[in-house]
């Protein structure tokens, strides 16, 4: 669909207000044309014989009142429609972006996505609320004025409008330039949002490395690029007013030459000619506005194209046709010859022929070097990504055949990168169960050994913790995340380095809480410290995306393979750290 008609389609649900606005525009146009029509009797009757003076004055005042009411109502109603359309657009964009897969977010910056939701939609707002209103209102006014011109003198009106086609070509050409340049302007604004968001989010690293000047230079460069781009748009728009004035001057010169001849020939009165000229001059305002309308619409279409590029996205993680709800886990979770790659090239291979079988209620520990594919493997279970080949099955059902909502409802996750929201402590703990009672929230917090520090906060459970929980320590954030998983009470649990941010004492307490949490649940545990996975029912060792070893802690140590070497290396590091000596090199 054409971007313009697609934008206007968002106003369809609000057509009642649009019809009312159009009615008000008709009132405005009628008042404007009526005022122009009173000019002739003013010159031919009132100023010469003072006849109908009272009626003319009353008519002028009444028409100005009618015109004002029409202008107010149409502007107000169109602004209301515009705000509603912008609201609908932003909501649709946010939902569309949020529904995308992890692959989508891995290739796009958050700041640039927010720019489309905020800046691009704002660019469209003027077109919907103001520009479309001006287009309809001023077009109706022009129709009224043109009708008057032909009513006064058809031949004179034809002469005055012969220059109208001269406007079309430059307006079309300039409109295309405005559209191209506006798109570059929106891209520059997107870059500003991205640079600023990145610098603010990483402010600690920026300060730690003394990179404030460098980040400021990046921001300055982005702002300077936006300035240059906006000036190109301004230079194009600045051409329109003098162009319209010149074309209007041509029309006035032609009317003056022809009209003077008609008056001398007695075919036109001075009052009639004055009224004609007045109507012609009154046309200038609407015509000038309409010349800017085209430019504004082109600006909105440039932003609209970017908006629709996002709205037309399709997620690669969706419910299959006929997908049904997943019943609570009662049997096994299987990874059957799973292959996965992030990209299309050979370097994108992250998992190769992984086959696992995990019985319900057991704990599987996944260990390996950094980058081996541990987190990728567990990310396949809640379908953050879909397998490239093979399948993941729960109780014999391919997880791609069940609904995402029912699948993810059975999975609780605690990750190394703790994600909290700028909400209260209670709100963060209850994120997975918004209907949880205060007592349930406190019980989960106590089980995660978080209640003690929460009680010491200024407002306890009602304390807001800031963006990403920055008002809390790393250990405190991690314990809130564990409390959140405890409260969700899911039958499947994924712990991805869940205790990495805790000190030794906190880790001991949380390990105790996690032991309670994992009881009678199917747990997938990724832990850097191998001492924390010794109690697992089974351990798999992943190296370069492949399962190279599996077994219990004792059997793997006895086998003397990669797990034994990793365990030995970590044990020596712990002893070295305790003694304060330099760690010796250990071969891989």
Image (cartoon, grey):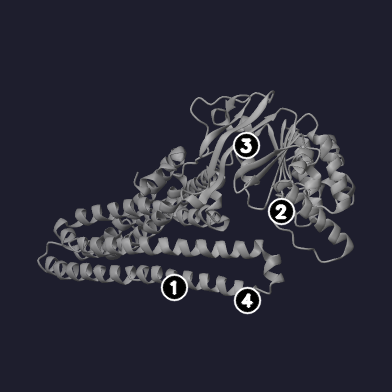
Q: CA distance from mark 3 to mark 2?
A: 25 Å
SS class of the residue under badge 1? Answer: helix
| Dot in front, 4 or 3 | 3
Q: CA distance from mark 3 to mark 1?
A: 48 Å
Mark 2 vs 4: CB contact within 8 A: no
Residue at 47% of width from left, 53% of height from top? 125
Q: Is residue 395 above or below residue 115?
A: above
Which residue is under mark 3?
A: 381
Q: Is residue 399 above or below residue 118?
A: above
SS class of the residue under badge 2? Answer: helix
Which residue is under mark 1?
A: 228
Going from N to C along the chain, the mark reached first, 3 or 1, is 1
Going from N to C along the chain, the mark reached first, 4 or 3, is 4
User: Based on the displayed image, in which of its 4 quarters is residue 173 positioned?
Assistant: bottom left
User: Based on the displayed image, in which of its 4 quarters is residue 184 positioned?
Assistant: bottom left
Going from N to C along the chain, the mark reached first, 2 or 1, is 1
Which residue is under mark 4?
A: 213
Q: CA distance from mark 4 to mark 3?
A: 43 Å
| Dot in front, 3 or 2 | 3
Residue 496 placement (x, y as % from top left): 71, 45
SS class of the residue under badge 4? Answer: helix
Going from N to C along the chain, the mark reached first, 3 or 2, is 3
Which residue is under mark 2?
A: 468
């Amino acid at each position: 669909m054409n971007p313009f008609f697609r934008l206007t389609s968002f106003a369809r649900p609000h057509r009642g207000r649009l019809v009312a606005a159009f009615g008000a525009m008709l009132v405005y146009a009628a008042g404007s044309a009526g005022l122009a029509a009173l000019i002739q009797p003013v010159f031919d009757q009132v100023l010469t014989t003072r006849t109908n003076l009272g009626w003319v004055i009353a008519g002028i005042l009444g028409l100005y009142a009618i015109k004002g009411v029409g202008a107010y109502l149409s502007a107000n109603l169109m602004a209301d429609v515009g705000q509603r359309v912008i609201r609908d657009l932003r909501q649709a964009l946010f939902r569309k972006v949020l529904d995308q897969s992890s692959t989508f977010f891995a290739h796009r910056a958050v700041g640039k996505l927010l720019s489309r939701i905020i800046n691009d939609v704002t660019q469209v707002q003027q077109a919907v609320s103001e520009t479309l209103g001006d287009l309809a209102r001023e077009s109706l006014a022009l129709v009224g004025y043109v009708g008057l011109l032909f009513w006064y003198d058809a031949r004179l009106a034809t002469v005055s409008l012969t220059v109208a086609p001269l406007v079309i070509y430059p307006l079309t050409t300039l409109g295309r330039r405005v559209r191209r340049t506006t798109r570059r302007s929106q891209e520059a604004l997107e870059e500003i949002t991205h640079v600023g968001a990145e610098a603010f989010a990483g402010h600690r690293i920026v300060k730690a490395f003394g990179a404030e000047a460098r980040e400021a230079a990046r921001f300055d460069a982005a702002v300077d690029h936006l300035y240059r781009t906006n000036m190109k748009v301004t230079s194009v728009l600045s051409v329109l007013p003098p162009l319209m004035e010149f074309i209007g001057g041509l029309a006035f010169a032609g009317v003056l030459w022809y009209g003077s001849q008609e008056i001398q020939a007695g075919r036109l009165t001075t009052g009639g000619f004055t009224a004609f000229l007045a109507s012609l001059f009154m046309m200038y305002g609407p015509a000038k506005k309409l010349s800017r309308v085209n430019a504004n619409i082109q600006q909105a279409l440039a932003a609209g194209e970017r908006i629709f590029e996002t709205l037309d996205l399709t997620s690669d993680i969706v419910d299959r046709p006929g997908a049904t709800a997943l019943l609570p886990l009662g049997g096994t979770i299987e990874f059957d010859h799973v292959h996965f790659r992030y990209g299309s090239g050979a370097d994108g291979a992250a998992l190769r022929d992984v086959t696992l079988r995990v019985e319900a209620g057991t704990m599987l520990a996944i260990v390996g070097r950094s980058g081996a594919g541990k987190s990728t493997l567990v990310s396949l279970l809640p379908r953050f990504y879909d397998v490239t080949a093979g399948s993941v099955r729960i109780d014999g059902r391919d997880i791609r055949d069940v609904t995402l909502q029912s699948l993810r409802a059975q999975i609780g996750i605690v990750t190394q990168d703790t994600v909290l929201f700028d909400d209260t402590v209670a709100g963060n703990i209850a994120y997975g169960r918004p209907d949880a009672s205060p007592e349930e929230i406190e019980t989960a917090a106590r089980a995660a050994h978080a209640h003690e520090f929460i009680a010491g906060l200024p407002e306890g459970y009602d304390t807001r913790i800031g963006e990403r929980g920055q008002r809390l320590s790393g250990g405190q954030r991690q314990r809130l995340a564990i409390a959140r998983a405890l409260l969700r009470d899911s039958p499947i649990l994924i712990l991805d380095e869940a205790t990495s941010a805790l000190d030794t004492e906190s880790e001991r307490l949380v390990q105790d809480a996690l032991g309670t949490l994992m009881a009678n649940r199917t747990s997938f545990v990724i832990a850097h410290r191998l001492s924390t996975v010794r109690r697992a029912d089974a351990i798999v060792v992943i190296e370069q995306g492949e399962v190279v070893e599996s077994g219990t802690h004792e059997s793997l140590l006895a086998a003397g393979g990669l797990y034994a070497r990793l365990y030995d290396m970590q044990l020596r590091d712990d002893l070295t750290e305790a003694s304060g000596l330099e760690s010796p090199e250990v071969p891989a």
